[in-house]
Structures are given as C-alpha cells and as structure tokens.
Amino acid sequence: MRWTVPYRSSSIQRRLAKVIHGLLLLANGSAMAASKTEQVEFNPAFFPGGAGAGQFDITRFNAGNVVLPGTYRSDIYVNGTWIGREELQFVSVEGQSSAQLCIDRAMLIRLGIDIDGVPQKAAQADTAAPTPFPAKPVCGDVSAYIPGATVTFDSGESKLEVQVPQLYMARTARGYVSPEHWDSGVSAGFVRYNANVYNANNYGQSSNSAYIGLNTGLNLGDWNFRHNGSYSRNTTGSGYQRNATFVQRGLAPLQSQLMMGEIYTSGEMFDSVRLRGVTLATDDRMMPDSLTGYAPIVRGVAETNARVSVRQRGVLLDEVSVPPGPFVIEDLFPTGYGGDLDVTVTEADGRKRRFVVPFASNANLLRPGYQRYAVSAGVIDELSLTERPWLMQGTYQRGLNDIVTAYTGANFSEGYYSPLIGAAFNTPIGAVSFDLTASQTEIPGADSMQGQSVQFRYNKNFAETGTNFALGAFRYSTDGFLGVRDAAQFRETASHGGDTSEIGRVRERLDLSLSQNMSQGSVYMTGSSQQYWSRKEKTLDFSIGYSNSWRQVSYTVSAQRSRDLATNRSNDQIDVTFSIPLGSAPRSPMLSTSLSHSDQQDAIRSGVSGTLGERNQFSYGASASRTQGSQTNTNSTDVDLTYRGQYAETSAGFSQGSGYRSNSFGVSGGVVAHPGGVTLTPELGDTFGIVHAPGAEGAAVGSGGNTQIGGNGYAVVPYLVPYRSNSVELDPKGMSHDVELKNASQNVAPKAGSVVMMAFETSTGRAVLINATQVDGSPIPYGADVFDEHGANVGVVGQAGKMFVRVAQDRGELTVRWGEAGADACRVPFDLGSVKQAGQLNFPQLQGVCKS
C-alpha cells in the first residue's frame, strides 16, 4: 500500500497547481506527472516572460505529496464508502519529503480489510505472497503487505481515501457502520413544542381552546431521558396529560435498546400495551439496511468466472462477479412488499441462464439466521384502568431458512396467561403467516375464561401487473379469548361488581389493502371490518381512490366511509378533485376544484394555493365553497398562511361562513441547549445534530429547507438517521465574503437519540482585491505567495498582479514572495479605513505599489 499525500498548504494553491498543470498539458504535454507519486514538472517557457529574470520559482509546485508531521482528525473512505472519523498520526520518515501515515493491524481491521487472509488470497490470485503485517504500527510504504492497495490523504479536506482490491476486503454487509464509529454525541437538553389556539363563534356562541404538545429530552453520556405530554384547555376544563416518560440507552453488543419508565410494548405479535416498567428489545437500526427486514438469499452455481445480475420488476438491484462454483448473495436491500427476483447468470463465454427466486415480504419474515426478541416487565398503565396489574411479556422470532420464519411469545399477568406460536412462509404465491394465541383469564367471583385466537396474514406483489395485494390480517377469536388489555379491564370491572357484557370482545377482524400502479396513474383500496361477541353492531371502514393526470390537469376520485362523532353514524362520501397550475413557472400557483357528495350534503369548493420565498418559506391558500344540505345551504371562505422561519414555524387560518366565524394561530419548533449555548430550530427529531461554524452566519445547512447558521455560529440539523452514515453539508451562499469554510461537508453516524456536535473550521478575515505593480510598473510575478505580518499565507497573485487576499486588520503590510532570493520579494501596504465596497462585489478593491 502506497501512501500518496497531495500538497494542500491552501485551497487557492491547490486550485492554482491544478489549473497550471491542466493548461500546460493542453499546450504540449510538457508537464508530466507520475500517477503514483503525483510528481509534476512544469515548463517555465510557457509562462509570460518565459524563464527569464524576475519570474518566480515554479519548482515548488512539482512536489505533490507534502504534508507536515502531526495528528489529523480525518474522515476515512474505503473504496468510496465512508467508514468513520479517526485521529491519524503522521511522522517524518528519512528519505521522504512528506510525513508518512502510521497504521496498525487494529486500524486495518476497522477499515474492513481481511488482514490475516491477505497472504492466502494473494496466492489464490496468482500474486506474489506479501510480507505478513507486523504487530507494531507501520509508518510509510506498506505496499508489501497488501498488494494493489493505495491510500490518498487530503489534509485540506481532512479526507483519507483508501482503495483496496475487493479480494482482500472482509465480507461485510453493505450500509454497515462499525460500532466503533457510532457517535454518542454531547450532553444536551431540548424541547420540541407544537402550540395552537383556536377561537370560534357559532351562531352567537363563542368557544375558545388552546393546546401545547411537548417532547422533551436530556442526554447525559449514553443515557437519554425523554418525556412526552400535552396541555389542553377548552370550555369544559383544562389539564396536563403525560404520554410517556422514560430513560433509554443502546446496548451495542446485544444490538438492543434498553428502556425504563412509561413505555409501550412493541405490538408485533400481541396488542401494544402502555407499561410502567422496563423493556429490552432488538433494535434493527443497529444492523445494516442490507440485513434487516426480509429478503431471500440468492444461491446458484457458476461454471466460469460469471456475472450475476439480480432484478426486480425490471430494476437492477445488484450485479456481482463470481468465480466458478457455488455462489451466495445474501445482502440484498429489502424492497418494500417485494416482488419475485429475476436472477441472470452470464458466463464468461456469453451463455446466459435465468431463474426466479420467489420473494414476498411480511412483517414476520426474517432473513435466515437473523433473530429478533423483546422482553418487557412492569405494571399495565392504561388510562382506562384504575388498578395497575403487573405484566411480563416476551417475544422471539428467528429466520430458519429462505422459506420459514418461526416466532413465539407469551404474556403473564395477574390472573392471566396467554401463549402464542406461529410461523411465516415465503411461497411462490406470496408471503403467508399463521399463528395461534390462547388465553386463560381468572375472573374474580366467576368461572375462568378460556379461548383461542387464530390469525392469518397474506401479501403478494404481482410484479407483472404492478398490483400489491395485502390481506393485512384475518383474526377469529372464540368467545372466551381475551387480549391482555381486555383481560385487565374485564377483571377490574368484575371485581367492582360491574357489567362485563359492556366490554367489547372482538370476534372477527378483517383488514384488506390493495394498490395498483398504472402507466399514468394509480388506484388504491383499504378496508377493515370488525365484529364483537357482546355487541350486535358490525363496524366497516373503507377508503378507495384513483389518481391520474391529463396534460397539465391532475385529478383524483376517492370514496371513504367515516363516522360522524356527533351522531355516531357512518357516513359515505365521494370526492372528485381537479388541479391545474396557473402558469408555466416551476412555482406557479395551483387552482383546485373539488366536488363532494355524502349522505348528509353536497359541496363544491374552489381555491388557489402555492409557495413563496427563495426557500419556499411561505405557503398560502385561499378557497371558497358552497354546501347544500337537506335543510340549509351555506357559503364559506377559508384563508391560511404558513411561514417556516429560521427559528420556528408559524401558521394562521381564518374561516367565515353562514352563521359562524373562526380563526386559529399556531407555532411549532424546538429549543436546544448544548455546550455552545441555546439554539432555536423550526423542527426537531429525536436524533439530530448541532453544526458549529464560527462566523458563518447565513450559510445554509443542507440543500433544502430554511436551516441556516445563526449569529452565534450554530444551527440544528433536525433529523439524522441513527447508526447510518449521514452527510451534512454547508452552502456558503448567503454568508459573509470575509469568512471562508475550510471544509463544507462532514459525515457522522449517530447513536439513536443522540445529539452530535459537528464543528466546521472557518477562517475569518476581511476579503480585499489589491491591484498592485512593482516600482518600475511591471506586474508582480504570477503565482507569487502573499503573507501577512505574522507570516500566514493569505492569498496568491493572479493575472496582471491582482491579489485576492483575506486580512485580519484594516491596516497593515503584505509581503509578496516568488523565489528564495532576497530580491524575489516586495511589500505592499494597505489601508481599508476609507475604502468602500466596489460595485456589485461585496469586498473592497485597492491600488498599490509593491516595494522591495
């Protein structure tokens, strides 16, 4: 492995060297570079004035591998994939003009290199056997240990790029970030809020209400404290209600999350229950995307060095080269509900073979060998209960092979026991799961109740027609079956002498989902029906819709059954909506018209909506409608406006109709207290980051949204994906020209719930353009370096003696140097005190004379 370190004394010099190199190559190829050492040799004859007197020494641009000894915290990329961020040690080595990187066995293993298997794999590849890697760190050329590997270090970008032949890489799943690189973040506290007030006057009677929802957190090391609750006030009363209060931390060796407090069970096999206690459960997020969820393993046999292509619905998912013999592909990314996999094996002689691997995803299907568990213990804390019975629950799933996943679980509570056993199957006709749950409930003052519940699930993606059919669940329960929540309520009601017949016990439940993608549209349908043992009524809910477009007109037809809360009666409604842009500009307003028909009334509504602002900060809408009922006809007008600012999102709405008027106002956002101070943000997730870029006020964070660096140099990245590589970038547009970003992007892999701090190095100074000549009127040599009074490099001389520099003071003197001799230098004084901005440029321009 050869360490190649490009020259990076400043970004300006790097760009200058590349420009010079490119121009000379275009001229006649006189600038030659050795690909491995990045040595270049420039022909001075192509510069103005040739190589005569007064020209600067261009040999300093020949060396392309200069880095100073020291420690550099750098992002590490292996074969183009971000691995992590580490401290790199560079030391001086005799005979080398650049400091050399020191690396040990542990670092190579962290990079995913199969260091112990290199000699054997090299022999298999017909390569000369390398020297075994020593136990002590190696500083310098280590190409003798890993054939064909290269490493390039860019100190200016803080980036180490490692290229290693795939042969010598350890077999790791794609999308995986090693736990050593997970960032626990910093100690911080935050509040995420959503508040609104509403005022209405209906036929002379006023009503007011207010609501504020809070999600708060405090991170201390690896422990995360969370509390969720809300406060509401209306004409009937007011009060604060807790939703959840708990502490959690990730356990990387177990790939699990530990949670204690007011929590909820998972609900994967049993009904989700609010619990005051503790739970330990598998966290799939700690696994790479290519191993979580379900996807079958592709197996086959190659007769030669072949290429294996895996497609789904015509989309290429993966393509790998395999040697002769059996092959296995087991790290395919899950793809929603799935669809059969079309595998093509192309042999070296051009022969192609194709076979199909059936694939249908199901919530209970796991990959072969993968397992998932959850263990919970505590007391049931449902709002409908006054007593708190204890509960213990455990679930376990394991993928046995490509076809079968087995799962089991059990609930234990006061006077209650419920076991479950089931299996999921991946079949050519779809994904099927079947499970059986039994329950036994001791009823105070009565006989015990026993029963069983059978559940069947099915889903299938028909790739040929683009149809996804999912029978979410069909469950049938006998009269004596009770879920854990119903059992607790049943026992409590019986112990107080109440009427248990009022408690609904589900007899049958059917959930149905169907979606169909078309060439220019889509159709969907969802429905659910439910019957009870103790009640005669049957509930049925459904929603169906069709969307398409014709030229610039988009239209949707939908039907839905809902329930009127005032009358407790079902209501069937059909809606037809048309939308068309009012103009050809990308952000032209949209004109929408909708017609609706229901059991109670008919209505027509027409309105205009759109966005405004450079970053779409403003969104607006205005509409008018007419409703015709069986007894009354009403007209109404609605106006709404939303502004997403840098620190919060605010919204307002106004409605007026026949006999009523209402208005509302809302604000949402977050407040984060961190080691650098307090930062406001319009939105906030559970795992987020803090960007610190001193002086970079106005720089945008990311490519979208309205997140910008504030006056204190901080900004919040509201959402980060836990245990994954997240790239965070800064856009310098909008920040002062007097500030320079040393690096514009960083990668981070946060732990779940963490608040990570990302520091972006900046350079602050007043930008100025100086047009200077020498005493005799001749221009200063092109490419000369410019230094301030402290010896810091602040710029470079461009064409015609123009110098774009960044200075820390308004007055001073700059030194220009283009050679090693004492005569190859001059000094330019500057005074910015009375200079104004130059036209459209946001920095001043000066005229000067460079004196020896």
Image: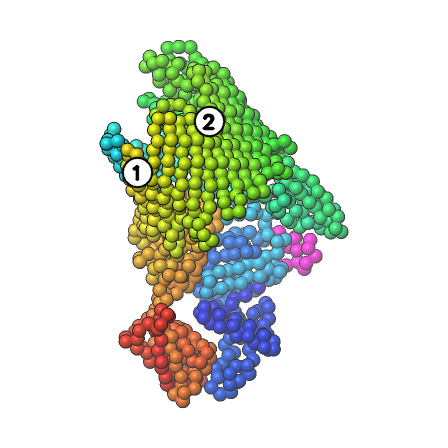
Please give the name of the residue rendered at 68% of the width and 49% of the height, measured from the top-left corner.
Answer: 307
Tell me, yes or no, if residue 691 can be seen here: no
Q: Quadrant of the N terminus?
A: bottom right
Amino acid type of the residue tagged 2 in the rendering? Asp
Q: Position of residue 154 (x, y in %)?
A: 49, 64
Q: Quadrant of the C terminus?
A: bottom left
Please give the name of the residue rendered at 38% of the width and 75% of the height, measured from the top-left corner.
Answer: 769
The answer to whether residue 121 is magenta is yes
Crowd tier of the residue under label 1, counting other residues whose Cα lies within 10 Å: few below 14, some 14–19, many 20 or above: some
User: Mark 1 — residue?
Assistant: 656
Amino acid type of the residue tagged 1 in the rendering? Gln
Mark 1 and 2 residues: CB-CB less than 8 Å, in contact? no
**Vertical order, 746 against 663 (above or below):** below
Q: Position of residue 589 (x, y in %)?
A: 42, 49
- Nearer the observer, disc 1 or disc 2? 1
The one of 651 and 732 positioned closer to us in this rendering: 651
Q: How many marks?
A: 2
Please give the name of the residue rendered at 35% of the width and 18% of the height, measured from the top-left corner.
Answer: 492
**Vertical order, 508 against 118 (above or below):** above
Q: Position of residue 631 (x, y in %)?
A: 35, 26
Q: Residue furthest top?
A: 446
Say which element carries label 1. Answer: strand
Magenta stretch: give its range.
116-131
**Vertical order, 344 against 814 (above or below):** above
User: Mark 2 — residue?
Assistant: 541
**First-in-chain label (1 vs 2):** 2
